[in-house]
Image: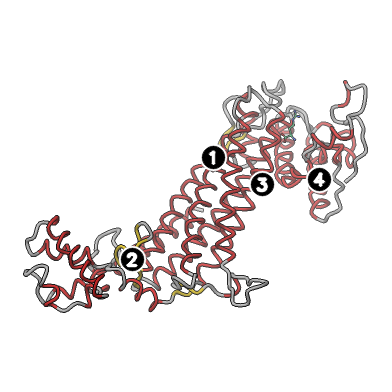
């Protein structure tokens, strides 16, 4: 990167001394915004095409510009492009190179636009692409959850409230809870995409332009749903980036909850899951350690995404209309949200299909902790005892179990009858784990058949989304 201090050739006309070398570096964004080079070129090609259509450029000028920009894209992709801090940002670097390549015609590209609407367009194009990549990765993770949930529809584990054993559930049901979180996340991304996919180009610096531009055409060329309504709002609005970061934060929050459970489950104390070695690392001092680094890191990374959401909110707070240089500070948070979310989703989508549940351990854990106590209470209600009284009876039975070290299903009929004489031999059906989960047989319940039905609905929903794309 060249760093020669000079008056910027793109706007230096009214300046009488060169920019201070530090100020040039301090105000430049090219180090990070060069990431949007493809979108910048895409936007410029559409702009030039529109300008030719309305007669501001000749067809020949348009063709030279498009040819030059296409070559510049290749130069960048082949690592031959020299980015210059003196040229501030991705926009002016590319434009300067265009002029260097095609001469005076290159200087006409910026007719009827400003970097203010240009950068707003670039970020929207960039985020639209990334929302699509992220959505695809999210779908891959959902697919993995559906497959695993189907395989584990009959696998019994303890369900928890307050992290205390509550009632038996199936592992498939637990995984489908994760799936549902991601269904909402996907919808949020798609909803946010609608507000990303609107064209600000044409707002120019802030007030619009005197050229007879056709913003509908530019919108169509770039695949935007429509042009924005107000030029002042167009160049200053970053709501879409905040919404995206909020949607990303919710995804990270969900991944962090899943991570926490995986960390707990892979511990020696729970021992519910084996996470294959390729997703873990060891300790340099404790030879026995196998650490669940991937879920831990994802849990940790959620914090930085939340941080970026707050950076962006704070960045926009109190900004007067229209564009302010503050807005240049939107890029690094946006890019880091994208990278962190992509990486975390990828790690999860790779890891989920590889989870190895230890079914016997899970079942054993559900057997401990009186997880069928509610089933006994419901049984007593069916035998005519009011729920509050049955709650009391079961509470006493559990107290007895704690004293004698027996779970409810392990007590004899006589032992159970000490607490209520309506209890008969058929009680053992409801005290088994399988009976308990099978009985919760309604939409949303943990019964294996319901889990399988939920998986089928999930598959149908994903297939429908795939057909829409
Ligand atoms: N690099 C700037 C940004 O990221 C581009 C727009 C600059 N506009 C201006 N009037 N200085 O926001």
Residue matched to label 4: 67
Distance from the alpha carbon under mark 2 to that under mark 3: 38 Å
Q: Secondary structure at mark 3?
A: helix
Q: Secondary structure at mark 2?
A: helix
Residue drawn at x 17%, y 75% as measured from the top left = 428
Coordinates of residue 257 in the picture (x, y in percent): 47, 56
40 horizontally vs 166: left or right = right
Q: Residues within 10 Å of mark 1 (few under 14, many from 20)?
A: many
Residue 451 - label: 2
Distance from the alpha carbon under mark 1 to that under mark 4: 36 Å
Residue 243 - label: 1
Q: Which comes before the other along the chain, label 1 or label 2?
A: 1
Q: Which comes before the other along the chain, label 2 or label 4?
A: 4
Q: Is mark 3 within 8 Å of ligand 1?
A: no
Is residue 133 at least partly visible in the picture? no
Q: Is residue 390 above or below residue 2?
A: below
Residue matched to label 3: 335
Which numbered mark, 2 or 4, is in the foreground of this view?
2
Q: Which comes before the other along the chain, label 2 or label 3?
A: 3
């Amino acid at each position: 990167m060249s760093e020669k201090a000079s008056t910027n050739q793109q706007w230096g006309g009214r300046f009488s001394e060169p920019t201070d070398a530090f100020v040039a570096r301090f105000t430049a964004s090219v180090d990070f915004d060069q990431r949007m080079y493809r979108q910048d070129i895409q936007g410029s090609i559409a702009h030039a095409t529109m300008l030719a259509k309305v007669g501001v450029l000749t067809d020949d000028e348009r063709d030279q510009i498009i040819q030059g920009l296409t070559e510049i894209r290749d130069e960048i992709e082949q690592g031959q492009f020299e980015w210059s801090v003196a040229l501030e940002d991705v926009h002016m670097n590319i434009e300067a190179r265009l002029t260097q390549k095609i001469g005076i015609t290159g200087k006409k590209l910026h007719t009827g636009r400003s970097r203010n609407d240009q950068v707003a367009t670039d970020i929207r194009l960039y985020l639209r692409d990334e929302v699509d990549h992220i959505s695809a990765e999210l779908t891959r993770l959902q697919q993995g959850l559906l497959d695993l949930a189907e395989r584990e529809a009959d696998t019994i584990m303890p369900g928890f409230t307050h992290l205390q054993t509550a009632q038996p559930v199936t592992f498939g049901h637990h995984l489908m809870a994760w799936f549902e979180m991601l269904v909402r996340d996907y919808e949020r991304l798609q909803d946010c995409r609608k507000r990303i996919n609107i064209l600000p180009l044409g707002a120019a610096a802030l007030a619009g332009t005197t050229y007879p531009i056709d913003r509908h055409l530019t919108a169509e060329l770039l695949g935007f749903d429509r042009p924005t309504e107000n030029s002042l709002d167009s160049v200053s609005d970053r709501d879409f980036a905040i919404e995206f970061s909020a949607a990303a934060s919710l995804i990270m929050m969900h991944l962090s909850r899943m991570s926490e459970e995986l960390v707990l489950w892979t511990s020696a104390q729970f021992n519910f899951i084996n996470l294959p070695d390729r997703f873990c690392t060891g300790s340099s001092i404790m030879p026995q350690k196998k650490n669940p680094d991937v879920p831990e890191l994802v849990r940790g990374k959620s914090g930085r995404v939340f941080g970026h959401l707050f950076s962006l909110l704070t960045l926009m707070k109190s900004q007067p209309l229209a564009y302010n240089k503050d807005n240049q500070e939107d890029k690094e948070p946006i890019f880091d949200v994208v990278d962190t979310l992509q990486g975390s989703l990828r790690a999860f989508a790779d890891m989920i299909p590889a989870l190895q549940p230890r079914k016997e351990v899970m079942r054993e854990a559900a057997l401990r902790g009186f997880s069928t106590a509610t089933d006994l209470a419901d049984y007593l209600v069916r035998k005519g005892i009011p729920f509050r009284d049955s709650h009391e009876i079961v509470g006493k039975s559990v107290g007895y179990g704690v004293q004698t070290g027996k779970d409810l299903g392990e007590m004899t009929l006589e032992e159970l009858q000490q607490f209520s004489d309506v209890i008969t031999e058929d009680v053992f059906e409801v005290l088994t784990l399988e009976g308990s989960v099978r009985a919760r047989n309604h939409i949303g319940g943990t019964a294996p058949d319901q889990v399988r039905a939920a998986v089928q609905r999930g598959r149908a929903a994903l297939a429908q989304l795939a057909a829409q794309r």
